[in-house]
């Protein structure tokens, strides 16, 4: 059954999927397959839609306006999101739309980062190879959400993606699905 | 010894041509005059190396046939139809008015009416070979004067038919037994034959021959086609040139058009050269020396009357030709032509004209032909430069600011570039010689120059001295290479961007100094290939990246071929194709590197 928001409308989830080579990816593809049939979910595959980085700004802003929950799903690469997602942010989250005078379209919406990393969880520690916790790596996202008046959620992270077994991947995909379902429940009940 | 003399004559002709023509060109006289002079020198009256002038003239007339075939190839039926008014109007007016005026001196000299009429008709015709060769050589065919002249020449070719039919009727008693109805049927049959052959039969035959891959058979068939049609036309007493022109028009839309052109061109050049040589040879200096006043008077009268008529009718085109174009038009057509030889010859055998009359007439016509290139030279050097300044009817153009971009060629390729610039509000000047293209874009505020972009004066007029970009989108690879050269030399500040047909053309453009080139098919073919990869299951970005990688590889292949000199090695722009393809495919066969992208899970 569909989850409804407090005003009785069905809750809408927009997943911004940013992966240049989805066919080579086991992990991100499994994650996406795990949630694509949830009620209210719209998947926006950025690299598939904008292979030459020419983004349809109006379409993107309309999709954003309709969403209650925005999920950015991508593999972390060099402590950052893939280039096209960066381009998306620069082009779509404009003054007067996402921030500044009159820019309150995103206000009150929630943002979830659903990411995979290449290295084990232990490496994201002060003594680890990556030195900073993954939450710290995601600070720019967090600040962006705040600047747009969004509610930034604790990220969903799957560490060590290249070395995950098939079983672990399936488990990860199940956890992702459950995580989204819970979020929707929560949002429905205020 | 017949064979030795044939070879001997060939050596004489070729030597004369090889010496005289480059010299004449060097002196700015044009190749036609060079051939004429060469002919006069080796002919019976100067060195006397060659005697059977008339035979050679007959053979060389075939050069005119090939010339008209080539011109037909440039004109498809639709364009020909759109010229019907100038052909009938201008051409008809020229022939009728010139004949009428040229009759007067004959009558005053006491000639019989029918004799004066035949002479006047013969003299009213202009020289297709001289006029068209000059137009082509100087790239004037696309100008308004050039087109009008062409229309008139075409009408004359048609008018010869009734004229030839009229002569036996005027002749003294020797009745015309060509049989009206039968003759008409034959003519209709021959034309129908050309249409069927040109339109339906040639393409399957060409396809068949193309499959065998025998280049020389292709050439042979092309020549056979033109010769056969010319012969068929001669059989029914139609103009051979007209028949081959018709065949050319019918083949203008065939996919073999360019190959045909490339095959015929060298033959045309040489035979036409031979034709001019033989006209030079037929100048009877003996007669000229014997009766200089009579001959010169004849030539002056001929040229004077025709200039007058041509000047007047050039003002009657719609819209009237501008002053410099009028002069060009008149000077181009003011001479007598090769058809006069034919007409007078027939009239002599029919007993209408005496040899005493025909000889000075033919000499006069030959001289008028020889003088034409000189007159054009005079026009160009002394008269026209003034007209270009004085006759400019739009002084507003000079005050107006020049556009930063010039696009040469507004066909499929140029139009896209133009629209792109337009969408960015960049004012653009367009050079094109297709009136259809031009009419349409004028309305949108483009500045348009009708004419050949490879002419320096037109480039200047279009503001090439002030412009920043020259975008060359011409269809003809040779013309575009020429334009790059010209622009580089005269307008060093221009950035030159050119459309290239393929690798070797790109190389030529770059060598001549183009700043940038884009192969016309490359990007769209890559786009299509990209979609293909997507249909095969590659992600959109992945396919896009594969195309980017291929583009880089292709560029590096170009650099490699250039460094190896492979692009220069004898691959002429017209005749490349297979060689280039082989090289490229060989290079492709070396394994295409597979890129791995670790880390994207």
Image (cartoon, coloured by chain):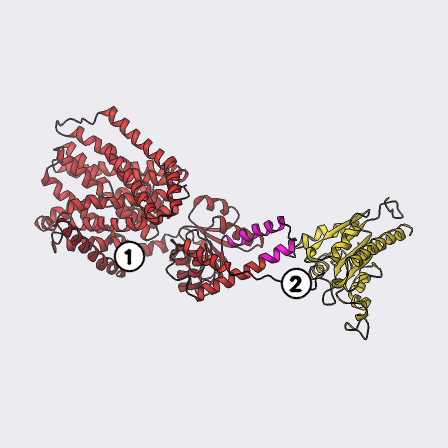
Chain colours: A yellow, B red
Task: From the top left corner, tell me how far across and down residue B358 is, in percent.
Answer: 13, 40
| Quadrant position of the C terminus of chain B in the picture | bottom right
Tag on residue B597?
2
In this view, the residue farthest toward the bottom is: A127
Task: From the top left corner, tell me how far across and down residue B546 is, in percent.
Answer: 60, 57
Do the residues at pointers 1 and 2 share their chain?
Answer: yes
From what the image shows, is residue B249 above or below residue B180? below
Task: From the top left corner, tell me how far across and down residue B175 is, in percent.
Answer: 15, 26
Subunit of mark 1? B
Frontmost residue, A54 versus A71: A71
Identified at 10% across, 39% down, the residue is B355
* Main SS of residues in magenta: helix
Disc 1 crowd rating (10 Å Cα; few below 14, some 14-19, many 20+) is: few
**Region in magenta:** B519-546
| Distance (Cα) linking label 1 and label 2 | 71 Å
Q: Which residue is mark 1?
A: B382
């Amino acid at each position: 059954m569909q989850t409804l928001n407090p005003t009785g409308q069905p809750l809408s989830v927009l997943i911004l999927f940013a992966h240049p080579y989805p066919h080579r990816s086991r992990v991100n593809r499994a994650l996406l397959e795990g949630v694509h049939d949830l009620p209210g979910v719209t998947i926006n595959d950025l690299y598939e839609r904008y292979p030459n980085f020419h983004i349809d700004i109006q379409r993107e802003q309309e999709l954003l306006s309709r969403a209650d929950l925005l999920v950015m799903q991508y593999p972390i690469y060099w402590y950052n999101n893939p280039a096209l997602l960066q381009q998306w942010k620069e082009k779509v989250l404009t003054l007067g739309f996402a921030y500044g005078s009159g820019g309150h379209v995103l206000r009150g919406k929630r943002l979830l980062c659903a990411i995979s990393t290449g290295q084990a969880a232990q490496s994201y520690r002060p003594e680890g190879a990556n030195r900073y916790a993954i939450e710290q790596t995601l600070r720019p996202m967090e600040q962006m959400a705040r600047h747009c008046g969004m509610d930034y959620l604790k990220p969903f992270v799957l560490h060590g993606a290249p070395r995950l077994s098939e079983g672990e991947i399936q488990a990860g995909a199940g956890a992702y699905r459950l995580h989204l379902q819970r979020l929707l429940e929560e949002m429905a009940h205020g | 010894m017949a064979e030795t003399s044939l070879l001997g004559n060939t050596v004489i002709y070729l030597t004369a041509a090889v010496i005289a023509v480059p010299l004449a060109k060097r002196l700015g006289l044009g190749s036609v005059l060079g051939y004429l002079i060469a002919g006069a020198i080796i002919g019976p009256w100067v060195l006397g190396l060659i005697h059977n002038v008339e035979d050679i003239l007959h053979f060389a007339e075939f050069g005119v046939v090939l010339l008209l075939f080539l011109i037909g190839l440039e004109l498809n039926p639709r364009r020909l139809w759109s010229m019907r008014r100038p052909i009938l109007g201008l051409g008809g007016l020229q022939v009728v008015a010139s004949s009428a005026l040229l009759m007067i001196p004959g009558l005053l000299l006491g000639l019989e009416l029918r004799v004066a009429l035949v002479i006047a008709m013969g003299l009213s015709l202009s020289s297709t070979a001289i006029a068209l060769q000059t137009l082509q050589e100087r790239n004037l065919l696309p100008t308004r004067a050039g087109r009008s002249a062409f229309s008139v020449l075409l009408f004359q070719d048609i008018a010869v038919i009734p004229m030839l039919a009229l002569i036996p009727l005027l002749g003294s008693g020797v009745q015309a037994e060509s049989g009206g109805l039968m003759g008409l049927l034959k003519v209709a049959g021959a034309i129908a034959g050309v249409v069927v052959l040109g339109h339906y039969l040639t393409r399957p035959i060409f396809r068949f021959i193309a499959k065998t891959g025998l280049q020389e058979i292709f050439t042979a068939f092309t020549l056979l086609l033109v010769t056969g049609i010319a012969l068929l036309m001669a059989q029914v007493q139609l103009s051979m040139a007209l028949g081959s022109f018709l065949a050319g028009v019918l083949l203008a839309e065939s996919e073999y058009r360019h190959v045909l052109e490339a095959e015929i061109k060298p033959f045309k050049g040489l035979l036409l050269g031979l034709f001019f040589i033989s006209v030079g040879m037929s100048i009877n200096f003996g007669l000229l020396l014997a009766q200089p006043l009579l001959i010169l008077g004849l030539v002056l009268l001929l040229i004077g009357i025709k200039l007058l008529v041509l000047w007047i009718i050039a003002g009657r085109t719609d819209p009237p030709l501008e002053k410099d174009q009028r002069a060009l038009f008149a000077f181009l057509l003011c001479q007598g032509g090769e058809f006069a030889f034919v007409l007078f010859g027939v009239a002599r055998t029919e007993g209408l004209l005496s040899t005493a009359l025909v000889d000075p007439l033919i000499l006069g016509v030959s001289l008028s032909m020889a003088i034409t290139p000189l007159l054009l030279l005079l026009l160009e050097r002394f008269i026209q430069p003034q007209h270009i300044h004085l006759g400019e009817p739009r002084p507003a153009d000079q005050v107006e600011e020049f556009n930063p971009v010039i696009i040469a060629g507004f066909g499929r390729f140029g139009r896209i570039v133009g629209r792109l610039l337009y969408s960015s509000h960049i004012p653009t000047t367009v050079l094109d010689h297709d009136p259809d293209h031009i009419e349409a874009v004028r309305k949108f505020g483009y500045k348009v120059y009708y004419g050949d972009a490879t002419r320096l004066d037109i480039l200047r007029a279009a503001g090439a001295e002030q412009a920043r970009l020259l975008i060359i989108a011409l269809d003809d690879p040779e013309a575009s290479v020429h334009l790059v050269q010209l622009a580089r030399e005269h307008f060093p500040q221009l950035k030159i961007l050119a459309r290239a047909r393929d690798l070797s053309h790109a190389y030529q453009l770059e060598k001549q100094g183009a700043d940038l080139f884009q192969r016309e098919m490359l990007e769209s073919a890559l786009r299509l290939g990209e979609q293909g990869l997507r249909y095969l299951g590659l992600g959109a970005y992945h396919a896009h990246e594969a195309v980017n990688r291929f583009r880089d590889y292709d560029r590096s292949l170009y650099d490699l071929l250039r460094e190896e000199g492979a692009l220069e090695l004898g691959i002429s722009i017209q005749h490349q194709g297979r060689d280039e393809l082989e090289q490229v495919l060989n290079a492709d066969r070396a394994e295409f590197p597979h890129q791995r992208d670790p880390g994207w899970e």
